[in-house]
């Protein structure tokens, strides 16, 4: 065999293997330090029936596998057959997780071969069902569980993670899982799914990713009463105990992996924005529920405004659901208006946000700091015809403001009623209506109803996938504001350029870049958002845009475009089986 040289000996793959390259052919070869059953038990290395006859002899696998050697294509055919035998999407999710636990390469190859079909099964909406059943369908650990009673062991727990170098950590405290709320330890299913999406949609190497659940108790009584619940049986922590625990985790992560990207996911409205603001300049981090949602909504809104032949600076915007996601979207809209020449005060004057108490105004109590700037003067509604003087409702706002944009992040199904939507459409040629709450059962309206009530004039994007709408003689695909168009590419760009932080400008750059992929440009009947079929290419463009924005703001070293593209490519997973051998053999 021709000689080979090591191309990576930095411990990235230790203790399992190192990568060497054949000097004559350029082929990358894995020198593995485990053999036999132990090798087959490592999902990152296991090839199952695809181990060659030579590998089986050299790595003590003879007799441990059926004798016939399969190609990866043949394995994929078998996986597809088994997948289709499962009776529903929850069962398919469990089957895929089992495959993930056995053979990581085959898992991702199968998923990427039909990504549009697979995404709803491994992520929203099915992941919500599996999270609710987490303790009852638990099969094998995939992630790090850090419980408050073990807080003194956090550094040791991080050391127990078998992969010594990490690119990204996705962490949740499970308080606000999708639209289903507090799910305790079961929230682990969310960071696992999000990091799978990193690889599926941006090609991020799965070896460098770690999902974490911070178990701070739960207020979900159904879980506390379940004898099979796997989490800490205690009411959810609040106050200084909670804050101190979060800080212990962040400081331990920084110490163990100083350059890691920290992805916050599904934290409650009281903590999500507060933690992001506290740590975003201390450790490179972002919150997908706030910033990812805002960026993908921005992309769809750019497309919708262009579709309507209008400008952001002319919009009157109502956001129904003034939590972290809704305010994050509002912040991006304000920035877009300012890019068109409005000052911040002028932009804010065009924004109307509602929470559970109705329209946010200067008399609304209990506002979070990030909501305060959106408080309207209470006096401006003095001439409105209100049904209830104690609360200015969504109907009140729509009937008096006549908005051009109506965005829902409330998780209150059916609140964009026929009366409200018809009133909006009576004063707007192309009403922009985005029911973004998920899962589907929480959407403020269905696209079919919105088209019916607006005579087919509405520009619609949703938070979860909906079927095509047939209106008149037209079949319309509804654009899905799927965060998977943003956060994997955002992460890839930040990891590749080694960004010191993730700024608002980097988030906006991601949304603006995504908007360039809208199929609606030049076609009035096209959807506002692309399909997942192009997501790997989209994520590549988003990653480059994010890295360039980081360089512009001094958050990453400036390099040439060629070097930046090389850095992005170096962080990608190749997605194929390698040839294995024992160390030192030739």
Image (cartoon, rainbow, N blue to C red):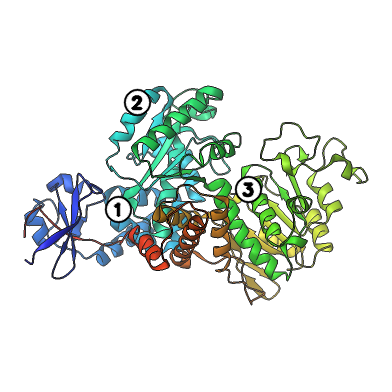
Where in the figure is residue 133, as x and y percent of width and height?
45, 39
| Disc 2 secondary structure class | helix
Q: Nearer the viewer, residue 43 or 239?
A: 239
Where in the figure is residue 258, as x and y percent of width and height?
37, 41
Sequence-first disc among 1 and 2: 1
Residue wearing tag 3: 328
Mark 1 and mark 2: span between their CA atoms? 29 Å
Residue at image position (58%, 43%) is 179
Residue at image position (63%, 60%) is 461
| Disc 1 secondary structure class | helix
Q: Which mark is residue 153?
A: 2
Q: Residues within 10 Å of mark 2 (few under 14, many from 20)?
A: few
Placement of the N terminus among the 4 image quadrants = bottom left
Sequence-first disc among 1 and 3: 1
| Disc 3 secondary structure class | helix
Residue wearing tag 1: 104
Q: Please state which of the two labelled residues, at mark 1 or mark 3, is closer to the viewer.
A: 3
Q: Nearer the viewer, residue 351 or 176?
A: 351
Left or right: 262, with 452 as reference point: left
Q: Residues within 10 Å of mark 3 (few under 14, many from 20)?
A: many
Determine the image quadrant of residue 57: bottom left
Where in the figure is residue 420, as x and y percent of width and height?
80, 54
* For the residues bearing labels 2 and 3, Cβ distance under 8 angstroms: no
Determine the image quadrant of residue 163: top left
Number of numbered markers: 3
């Amino acid at each position: 065999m021709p000689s080979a040289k090591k191309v990576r000996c930095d411990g990235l793959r230790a203790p399992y293997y190192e990568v060497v390259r054949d000097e004559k052919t350029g082929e990358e070869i894995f020198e593995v330090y485990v053999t036999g059953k132990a090798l087959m038990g490592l999902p990152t290395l296991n090839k199952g029936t695809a181990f060659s006859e030579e590998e089986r002899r050299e790595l003590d696998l003879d007799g441990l596998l059926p004798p016939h050697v399969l190609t990866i294509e043949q394995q994929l055919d078998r996986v597809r057959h088994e997948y289709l035998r499962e009776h529903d999407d929850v069962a398919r999710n469990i089957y895929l997780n089992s495959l993930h636990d056995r053979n990581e390469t085959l898992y991702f190859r199968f998923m990427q071969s039909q990504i549009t079909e697979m995404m709803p099964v491994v992520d929203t909406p099915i992941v919500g069902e599996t999270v609710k059943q987490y303790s009852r369908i638990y099969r094998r650990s995939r992630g790090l569980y850090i419980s408050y009673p073990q807080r003194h062991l956090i550094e040791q727990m991080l050391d127990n993670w078998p992969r010594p170098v990490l690119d990204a950590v996705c962490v949740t405290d499970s308080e606000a899982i999708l639209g289903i709320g507090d799910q305790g330890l079961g929230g682990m299913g969310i960071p696992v799914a999000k990091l799978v999406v990193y690889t599926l949609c941006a090609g991020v190497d799965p070896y460098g990713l770690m999902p974490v659940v911070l178990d701070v108790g739960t207020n979900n009584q159904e879980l506390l009463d379940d004898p099979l619940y796997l989490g800490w049986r205690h009411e959810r922590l609040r106050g200084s105990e909670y804050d101190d625990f979060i800080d212990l985790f962040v400081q331990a992560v920084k110490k163990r992996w100083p350059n890691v990207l920290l992805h916050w996911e599904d934290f409650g409205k009281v903590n999500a924005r507060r933690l992001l603001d506290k740590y975003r300049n201390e450790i490179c981090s972002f919150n997908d529920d706030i910033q990812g949602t805002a960026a993908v909504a921005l992309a769809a809104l750019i497309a919708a405004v262009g579709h309507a032949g209008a400008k952001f600076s002319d919009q009157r915007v109502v956001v129904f659901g003034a939590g972290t996601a809704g305010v994050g979207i509002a912040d991006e809209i304000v920035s877009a208006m300012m890019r068109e020449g409005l000052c911040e005060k002028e932009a804010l004057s065009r924004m109307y946000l509602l929470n559970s108490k109705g329209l946010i105004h200067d008399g609304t109590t209990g506002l979070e700091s990030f909501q305060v700037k959106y408080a309207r003067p209470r006096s401006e509604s003095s001439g409105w015809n209100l049904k209830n003087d104690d609360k200015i409702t969504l109907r009140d706002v729509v009937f008096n403001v006549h908005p051009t944009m109506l965005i829902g992040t409330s998780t209150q199904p059916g609140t964009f009623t026929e009366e409200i939507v018809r009133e909006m459409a009576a004063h707007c040629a192309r009403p922009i209506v985005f029911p973004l709450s998920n899962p589907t059962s929480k959407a403020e309206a269905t696209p079919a109803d919105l088209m019916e009530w607006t005579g087919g004039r509405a520009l619609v994007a949703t938070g979860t996938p909906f079927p095509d709408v047939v209106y008149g003689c037209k079949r319309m695909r509804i654009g899905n504001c799927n965060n998977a168009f943003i956060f994997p590419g955002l992460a890839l760009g930040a990891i590749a350029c080694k960004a010191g932080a993730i700024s608002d400008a980097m988030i906006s750059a991601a949304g603006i870049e995504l908007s360039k992929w809208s199929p609606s440009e030049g076609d009035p009947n096209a959807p506002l958002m692309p399909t997942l079929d192009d997501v790997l290419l989209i994520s590549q463009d988003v990653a480059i845009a994010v890295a360039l924005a980081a360089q512009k703001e001094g958050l990453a070293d400036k390099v040439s475009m060629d070097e930046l593209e090389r850095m992005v490519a170096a962080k990608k997973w190749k997605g194929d089986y390698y040839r294995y051998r024992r160390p030192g053999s030739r």
